[in-house]
Image (cartoon, rainbow, N blue to C red):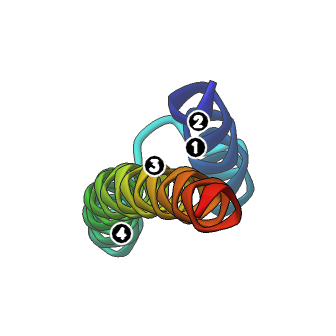
């Protein structure tokens, strides 16, 4: 989905830059290469952020499990104290 969107943006920008000429000139080719480099950079950044998000999600799940264990231990301790 993201690649399709980026391709459409790139096509729109390139279409606006090229117009009706039969061949792109040197400046237009430079713009195209710059856009491709930017798309590539943004895709790498997206992958990095998705990886970071996955790590944070796992960390949150681990903390939630630890919190639940502590709450369970507390409940057991309180129950044992009442029985004394």
Q: Nearer the viewer, residue 21 or 14?
A: 14
**From mark 1 to mark 4, how far is it between C-alphas?**
10 Å
Q: Are marks 3 and 4 in contact (CB under 8 Å)?
A: no
Q: Position of residue 34 (x, y in %)?
A: 31, 71
Q: Position of residue 12 (x, y in %)?
A: 72, 46
Residue 6's tag is 1
Mark closer to the chain start, 1 or 4: 1
Question: What element does badge 3 sit on?
Answer: helix
Q: Residue at x 51, y 31 (%)?
A: 3
Q: Residue at x 27, y 61 (%)?
A: 48
Q: Nearer the viewer, residue 84 or 16?
A: 84
Residue 38's tag is 4
Pointer 3: residues within 10 angstroms few (<14), some, or many (20+)? few
**From mark 2 to mark 1, how far is it between C-alphas?**
6 Å
Q: Is 65 on the left-hand or right-hand side of 79?
A: left
**From mark 3 to mark 2, how far is it between C-alphas?**
34 Å
**From mark 4 to mark 2, how far is it between C-alphas?**
14 Å
Q: Are marks 2 and 1 in contact (CB under 8 Å)?
A: yes
Residue 62's tag is none
Q: Nearer the viewer, mark 3 or mark 4?
A: 3
Residue 65's tag is 3
Question: What element does badge 4 sit on?
Answer: helix
Q: Are marks 3 and 2 in contact (CB under 8 Å)?
A: no
Q: Which residue is mark 2?
A: 2
Mark closer to the chain start, 1 or 3: 1
Pointer 2: residues within 10 angstroms few (<14), some, or many (20+)? few
Q: Residue at x 47, y 57 (%)?
A: 73
Question: What element does badge 1 sit on?
Answer: helix
Mark closer to the chain start, 3 or 2: 2
Q: Position of residue 56 (x, y in %)?
A: 40, 64
- In the rendered image, the quadrant that contains the C terminus is bottom right
């Amino acid at each position: 989905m993201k690649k399709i969107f980026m391709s459409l943006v790139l096509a729109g920008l390139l279409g606006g830059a090229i117009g009706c000429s039969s061949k792109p000139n040197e400046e237009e080719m430079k713009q195209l290469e710059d856009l491709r480099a930017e798309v590539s950079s943004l895709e790498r950044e997206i992958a990095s952020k998705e990886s970071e998000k996955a790590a944070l999600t796992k960390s949150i799940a681990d903390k939630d499990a630890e919190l639940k264990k502590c709450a369970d231990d507390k409940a057991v301790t309180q129950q044992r104290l009442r029985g004394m």
